[in-house]
Image: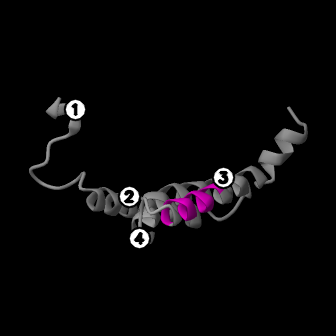
Amino acid sequence: MSGPLSAWFESGRAINVVLAVFLLEAIWLVVSGRMRWFAAAAALLPGVAMVLALRIVIADGDWLWVALLLTLAFPVHLADLVHRGVLRRGRTSRARQA
């Protein structure tokens, strides 16, 4: 199936739009005072890394970059969870408290 929308995705332009939305979200989170830069970066960087990996795959890029981005996404995600207090010892989840 080919057409303008298919070409838009195959060229990676759709991924560029997603990355721009990530950037706008980060700016909004910081400017609105909902998060500081570190918190916003920790929350959004895993998704950005996965989207960039997808962009590399679509562009037939080197698999090493894909592996690196996906590998780096996990520790950043863990840092975000620790920062939010989700991975602290002794804390129960909200579902268990109900």
Q: Earlier in the sequence, mark 4 or mark 1?
A: 4
Query: Which numbered tag is attached to residue 67?
Result: none
Locate residue 79: give its quadrant.
bottom left
Q: CA distance from mark 2 to mark 4?
A: 12 Å
Secondary structure at numbered mark 1: helix
Could you tell me if the residues under marks 4 and 1 are in contact, i.e. CB atoms within 8 Å?
Answer: no
Q: Which residue is mark 2?
A: 77
What's the amino acid at mark 1?
Answer: Ala
Q: Are marks 3 and 2 in contact (CB under 8 Å)?
A: no
Mark 3–mark 4 CB contact (< 8 Å): no
Q: Which residue is mark 3?
A: 18
Nearer-the-camera pick, 91 or 68: 91
| Secondary structure that dominates the magenta span | helix
Q: Residues within 10 Å of mark 2 (few under 14, many from 20)?
A: some
Secondary structure at numbered mark 4: helix
Residue 27 figure quarter: bottom right
Q: Residue at x 22, y 32 (%)?
A: 95
Residue at the limit of the structure toward the left, as seen here? 90
Q: Identity of the amino acid at label 3?
A: Val
Kind of residue indicated by mark 4: Phe
Write down the residue under mark 4. Answer: 38
Residue linked to disc 1: 95
Q: Is residue 87 left or right of residue 6?
A: left
Picture residue at 12% right of the left edge, 54% below the top: 89
